[in-house]
Image (cartoon, helix red, strand yellow):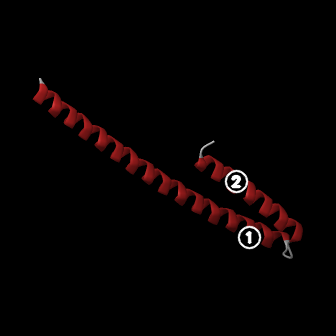
């Protein structure tokens, strides 16, 4: 399991445990607790989505850099081959 999947699994597990504990010890009414859970879940989901977008941008930048390195390597190899041949 890669780090992103592991992080998502741990995040969701922690969120579930936190919600369960909060429900057991909540001094609020059911309606207030439901609103709190919805707000918390929405906030955490937005953070997870933001993190996912950041990871995708980093991955895209890495792939682009790798392509550039390969292109430069091919050009250098072609240049050396042309000089030798």
Q: Going by the image, does 22 lie left or right of 7?
A: right
Q: In the image, 28: left or right of 2?
A: right
Relative to residue 82, is residue 14 depicted above or below? Answer: below
Query: Farthest residue in the top direction?
Result: 85
Say which residue label 1 marks. 36
Give the residue drawn at x 34%, y 46%.
Answer: 64
* Snapshot quadrant of residue 27: bottom right
As drawn, the label of residue 10 is 2
Using the image, determine if residue 5 lies above or below residue 30: above
- On screen, residue 33 versus residue 4, left or right, reads right
Between 39 and 50, the residue placed more toward the observer is: 50
Image coordinates of residue 44 in percent, x first then y, are 64, 63
- Write the residue at 16% across / 32% down: 80
**Residue 38 picture location, percent across and down:** 71, 64
Residue 70 location (% of width, % of height) = 30, 38
Question: How far is mark 1 from mark 2, CA to CA?
Answer: 21 Å
Give residue 76's quadrant in the image. top left
Whichever of labels 1 and 2 marks the residue nearer the N terminus, that label is: 2
Which is more toward the observer, 44 or 1?
1
Q: Quadrant of the N terminus?
A: top right
Q: Quadrant of the C terminus?
A: top left
Name of the residue lying farthest toward the front? 84
Give the residue at x 74% y 65%.
Answer: 37
- Where disc 1 sits, the SS reads helix
């Amino acid at each position: 399991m890669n780090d992103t999947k592991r992080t998502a699994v741990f995040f969701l597990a922690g969120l579930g445990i936190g919600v369960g504990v909060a429900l057991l010890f909540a001094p609020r009414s059911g309606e207030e607790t439901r609103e709190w859970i919805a707000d918390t879940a929405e906030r955490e989901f937005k953070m997870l989505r933001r993190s996912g977008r950041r990871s995708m941008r980093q991955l895209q930048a890495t792939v682009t850099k790798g392509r550039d390195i390969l292109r430069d390597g091919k050009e250098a190899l072609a240049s050396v081959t042309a000089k030798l041949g």
